[in-house]
Amino acid sequence: MPNELPSYTNQIESGTDYTIMFCLDSLNKRLRLDDYRGNIDAIYERVVEIAKAHTLTKLFIKSREHDWQAFLSKGCMLEGIYKGYYNGSDAYCMAWYEDLERRTSDYWLEEDQIIKQVFAIPLKPDRPAVPTHCTLRLARSEDAESLANLYKEIFQTYPTPMHDPAYVAKTMREGTIYYLVETATQLISAASAEINTVYANAEMTDCATLPAYRNLGLMRLLMHALEEDLISRHITCAYSLSRALSFGMNAVFFQLGYRYYGRLTKNCDIYDKFEDMNLWVKSLK
């Protein structure tokens, strides 16, 4: 069931002995296998075939625990573990690459140093106060344009079409929730949770703050608000993919009690290049 955006389409395909649910993501030159049923050999052959047909350079598989070694035996690499992703059971992030440039990280050792620095800072689990003259609230559909403008201002490139108000509004209709912080005159910070109600998980994503308002604890504030909302919806697993080169966002998740579960090589096009992403996971039970 493809959506209306040809560069980023979610699809379902069934064969004689399999069903696959995947995102055909030409923006990031990858195929992301989000869910599947059936014969693992047939599934793997088909997703590789689709990736090659669309000249995609990375295949990103969310494998169930009992299948990850089968994908490993076919040449995939284990890059991270989504703890509790499938209603409490783990998902294993398996990756297959079509070319060496996509497979090779340009900043791995620098990213190792950043994560070591993150691990050395103190935890800050408490919810920060809303700054004076600011408002924290759940976003509404009429906020789509101002949210798109925020993402356009912060990110030169982004893994999803968040600069498009129509796309932002579409994600809201499909169940993604956004919280934002605003002054009387402008939107200054926002973050979202993309909810999977079938498996009780949510991706914490689309984090952005205007430069003039950073270091005020706004992102920790937004994460607290999102987590409280998710708990009320019986979501038990929260996870996020943070730029491995960004000390700030990795620090936010570490301080809030998320745990580091791996690094995905050149996983998406963000800012101005393909970047490695750190995987952070937190149980909301």
Image (cartoon, rainbow, N blue to C red):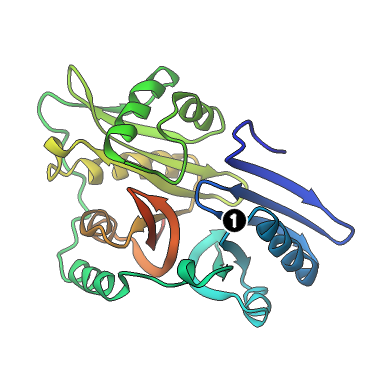
Q: Give the x, y percent position of residue 101.
A: 46, 69
For residue 38, above or below residue 19: below
- Based on the displayed image, in which of its 4 quarters is residue 67 positioned? bottom right
Going 60% across and 63% down the picture, which residue do you hit? 61
Going 35% across and 68% down the picture, which residue do you hit? 260
Q: Give the x, y percent position of residue 176.
A: 48, 36
Tell whether 184 sits left or right of 270. Answer: left
Going 21% across and 66% down the picture, which residue do you hit? 118
In this view, the residue farthest toward the right is 16
Who is closer to the viewer here, 45 or 33?
45
Who is closer to the viewer here, 246 or 175?
246
For residue 167, above or below residue 113: above
In this view, the residue farthest toward the bottom is 73
Tell whether 81 sits left or right of 255. Answer: right
Q: Give the x, y percent position of residue 39.
A: 80, 68
For residue 249, above or below residue 119: above
- Based on the displayed image, in which of its 4 quarters is residue 53 positioned? bottom right
Under mark 1, the amino acid is Arg
Asked whether residue 284 is in view, the answer is: no
Quarter that holds the N terminus: top right
The residue that label 1 is drawn on is 32
The secondary element bearing badge 1 is classed as: strand
Who is closer to the viewer here, 58 or 67?
58
Asked whether residue 101 is in view, the answer is: yes
Who is closer to the viewer here, 201 or 27?
27
Q: Give the x, y percent position of residue 163.
A: 40, 31
Other-residue count near label 1 (Cα within 10 Å), few / some / many at <14 / 14–19 / ≥20: many
Quarter that holds the C terminus: bottom left
